[in-house]
Image (cartoon, rainbow, N blue to C red):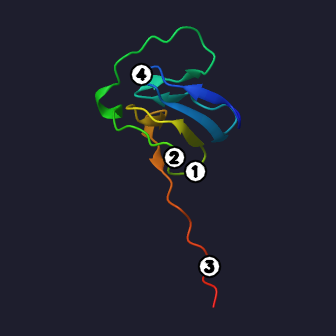
Amino acid sequence: MKPGTRLRSAVCDGEVVIVRAPSGALPLQCGGRDMLAVDAGPREVLPPLPRFDGGTQLGKRYADAAATVEVLCTKPGVGALSYGDELLEPRSARALPASD
């Protein structure tokens, strides 16, 4: 995984772009199954695993708790994103400093 890589889900229509990834990274997953390259062969849709069916939202950034992995959702889907066994959470917008 490296920044700019586009991946698609094996369980739904979801697609993401890698924003930040550590070297020697674990595979990114959607719906509990490894994500594939966007240009990978024919689409064989598998069912999402029970704990990983929370879905993704278009335009949201998702990251792990330590912010070592960050992805941007470019196409929503029913599978939840995870890195290893840790679910990725949507990042909230940063508060801008007040200007007085």
Is mark 1 in CB contact (under 8 Å) with mark 2? yes
Location of residue 8 in the rendering, given as x and y in whole percent from the top left corner: 54, 25
What is the C-alpha distance between the residues marked 3 and 2? 25 Å
Residue 15: % across, % down? 54, 30
Q: Position of residue 70 (x, y in %)?
A: 59, 44
**In whole angstroms, how far apart are the C-alphas of marks 4 and 1?**
25 Å
Q: Residue at x 49, y 42 (%)?
A: 58
Left or right? Give the position of 72 relative to 3.
Answer: left
Q: How many marks?
A: 4
Judging by the rendered image, the residue that carries numbered circle 1 is: 67
Vertical comparison of 8 with 89: above or below: above
**How far apart are the two marked residues, 3 and 1, measured between alpha carbons?**
22 Å
What is the distance, in whole Å, between disc 3 and disc 4 at their CAs? 41 Å
Considering the numbered disc 1 on the image, is that residue within a helix, a strand or a loop?
loop
Discs 3, 4 touching: Cβ within 8 Å: no
Helix, strand or loop at label 4? It is loop
Q: Residue 47: x and y, percent? A: 34, 19
Q: Which residue is mark 3?
A: 97
Query: Which badge, 3 or 4, comes first in the chain's sequence?
Result: 4
In the picture, the disc for residue 25 is none
Q: Residue furthest bottom?
A: 100
Query: What's the amino acid at mark 3?
Result: Pro
- Residue marked by disc 2: 64
**Residue type, mark 4 in image:** Val
From the viewer's perspective, tell me whether residue 35 is left or right of residue 52.
right
Query: Disc number at residue 11?
Result: 4
**Mark toward the viewer: 4 or 1:** 4
* Farthest top residue in view: 42
Amino acid type, residue under disc 2 in the picture: Asp
Report the amino acid beneath label 1: Ala
